[in-house]
Image (cartoon, rainbow, N blue to C red):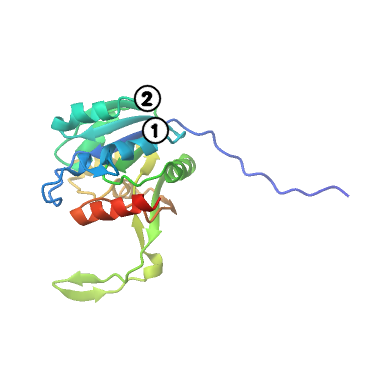
């Protein structure tokens, strides 16, 4: 009797991916702490963030977007990381900073991974997972289920309670087809639309974003309390 085998799923060749790490914010909620250079277990936050992308084989090169005054210090911190192609100055908004970072990537880059510099606990495993999903679907992001009940509020009055089962907290890196993301950001700029993340820009174009499993430890450091939490999480590893 002839053996019946299941058809193997064909894996697409992995496209060349460039990472843009955005660390150009003013850190206005950090109480005077420069979070980009804040120490986590004796290592500046930005270096810890960049190292995860350096360690991910699916990433070909890295561009860091930061404040003008941090270009030289960050360049020095990352001089031993051969994937770091450039450290460039950011713009007046996050959208503009992402655009500047995309411009600094090499020709031939097909996928762009956009990551918040203030997410220093990202792992190369999550990065790899998102890149491979975007390689297949064109757009992907990591996310975790929301634990709290969410309320839609207007004028301090509850208007609706969305089904928690449908709600996810989206993280970064968010990875896209390079040309798709550039076009989406340009369209948002032309329309005068302010988007809260890069997925939102792509969604405006009618593109579906594939959600993959994120990591609860992949927190964004926005306040001094977040910095303490990140420190504690690292100490547990």
- In terms of image quadrants, where is residue 123? top left
Q: Is residue 50 positioned above or below 203 on the image?
A: above
Quarter residue 173 falls in = top left
Against 159, is 106 above or below?
A: above
Numbered tag placed on residue 54 in the rendering? 1
Q: Secondary structure at mark 1?
A: helix
Please provide percent x and percent y for residue 140. Answer: 41, 47
Element assignment for label 2: loop
- The answer to which of 83 and 157 lies nearer the viewer is 83
Q: Which residue is mark 2?
A: 82
Residue 191 lies, in percent from the top left, at 20, 45
User: Relative to residue 173, is residue 217 depicted above or below?
Assistant: below
- Which residue lies at the image location 38% right of the left edge and 56% below the top edge? 216
Which residue is at a point 66% across and 44% down the rendered structure image?
A: 8
Mark 2 crowdedness (10 Å alpha carbons): few <14, some 14-19, many ≥20: few
Q: Relative to the observer, which residue lies in front, 172 or 119? A: 119
Confirm or deny contact between disc 1 and disc 2 (CB under 8 A). yes
| Residue 207 image offset from top left, x and y in percent | 38, 48
In the rendered view, does 133 fall on the left or right side of 75? right
Tell me the residue at 26%/71% (across/down): 151
Q: Estimate how packed mark 1 is, as few (under 14), some (14 to 19) or many (20 or more) residues with alpha carbons within 10 Å.
A: many
N-terminal label among 1 and 2: 1
In the rendered structure, find residue 33 and report the number of the disc placed on it.
Answer: none
Q: Position of residue 68 (x, y in %)?
A: 14, 31
Is residue 186 at all visible to an observer of this figure?
Answer: no
Residue lying furthest right: 1
x 24%, y 51%: residue: 227
């Amino acid at each position: 009797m002839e053996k019946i085998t299941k058809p193997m799923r064909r894996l697409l060749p992995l496209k060349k991916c460039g990472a843009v790490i955005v660390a150009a914010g003013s850190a206005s909620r950090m109480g005077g702490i420069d979070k980009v250079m804040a120490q986590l277990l004796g290592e500046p936050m930005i270096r810890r963030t960049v190292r995860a992308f350096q360690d991910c084989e699916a990433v070909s090169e890295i561009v860091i977007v930061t404040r003008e005054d941090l270009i030289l210090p960050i360049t020095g911190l990352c001089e031993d990381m051969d994937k770091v192609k450039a450290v460039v100055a950011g713009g007046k908004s996050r959208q503009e900073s992402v655009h500047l970072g995309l411009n600094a990537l090499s020709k031939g880059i097909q996928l762009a991974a956009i990551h918040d510099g203030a997410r220093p606990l990202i792992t190369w495993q999550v990065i790899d997972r998102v890149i491979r999903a975007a390689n297949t679907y064109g757009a992907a992001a990591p996310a975790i289920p929301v634990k709290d009940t969410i309320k839609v509020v207007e004028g301090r009055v509850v208007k609706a309670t969305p089904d928690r089962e449908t709600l996810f907290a989206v993280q970064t890196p968010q990875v896209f087809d390079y040309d798709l993301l550039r076009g989406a950001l340009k369209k948002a700029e032309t329309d005068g639309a302010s988007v809260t993340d890069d997925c939102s820009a792509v969604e405006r174009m009618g593109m579906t974003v594939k959600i993959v499993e994120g990591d609860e430890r992949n927190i964004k450091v926005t306040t001094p309390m977040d910095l303490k939490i990140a420190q504690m999480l690292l100490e547990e590893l």
